[in-house]
Amino acid sequence: MPEGHTIHRLAADLDDRFGGRPVRASSPQGRFEAGAALVDGRTLGSADAHGKHLFLGFTGAGGSAGGDWIHIHLGLYGSFRHGDGPPPAPVGLIRLRLATAEAPLAYADLRGPNTCELLTEAEKDAVAGRLGPDPLRADADPGRAWARISRSRTTIAALLMDQKVVAGVGNVYRAEVLFRHAIDPYRAGKDLTRAEWDAIWADLVGLMREGVRNNRIDTVRPEHTPEAMGRPPRVDDHGGEVYVYRRAGMPCHVCGEEVRTAPLAARNLFWCPACQKP
């Protein structure tokens, strides 16, 4: 499932291509035909992201204020691909197609999302209101997350993946930020100090902003890059240099201990038992 930086990057790309322009909307697959028809020909006012949720805002009918929002959650299998020029003939199950009505031509195709629905402004605010603070949003309040974490007996690893606590953090950022701060993933949230939480939050903000800029997740410090350590670069379809994610059974870049993995909250957890002692 894409992590929050991917959705923010996607929102920026769609805003660049379609923002402020009349957009043709269709549903070649047919499953979003009614929703696409309601925004077809209207102007895309803005693309917004909150955690792993994407919102595309369209002006009201006739250009009036108070328009509608297409709410998209890609889930495990969704993808949103965009390109320049006229859209090609539809291939496969395209839930939503966006295309510019005039030059410069551009298009974007949405396939296999978990959610694709049309919402009012109030309904969009309700969805966002159920989410925790997003490290990539300027309006994020890390104190909201701390209020829940500091009272919880749930592991910090599980709390970081709970989108109602922190929005946008996925399995990679969860594993890597805990390693970078030498925190045992099984430690209860209530046993974290406020200073530790503030450091985790600040690190997430920095790492995820880099993810948006580079369109990949890199979490190793300069002294642990392949060049600095004289080791081969990581080969993985997720890309990026990491400390523990998907490195089970391999030596830790810092101490040499074998990286471990275990299931937690239906996802695989990765950590170094020496660097992240209880």
Image (tube, rainbow, N blue to C red):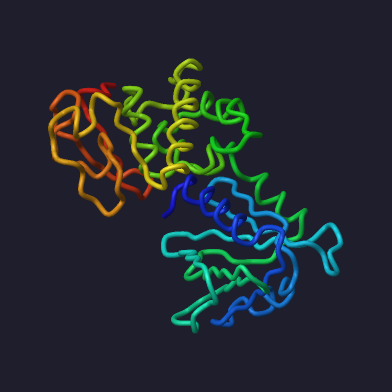
- Classify residue 269 as left or right of residue 49: left
Q: Is residue 84 above or below residue 93?
A: above
* Residue located 74% across and 64% down the image: 43
Q: Is residue 15 above or below residue 102?
A: above
Write down the quadrant of residue 217 in the picture: top left
Residue 51, image x, y percentages: 55, 46
Residue 243, image x, y percentages: 26, 34
Which residue is nearer to you in this view: 184 or 229? 229
* Residue located 79% across and 61% down the image: 67
Residue 221, image x, y percentages: 30, 27
- The number of numbered badges drawn on the structure is 0
Residue 41, image x, y percentages: 73, 73
* Residue located 47% across and 43% down the image: 212
Q: Quadrant of the N terminus?
A: bottom left
> In the orientation shown, which residue stands out farthest toward the front?
103
Which residue is nearer to you in this view: 174 or 192? 174
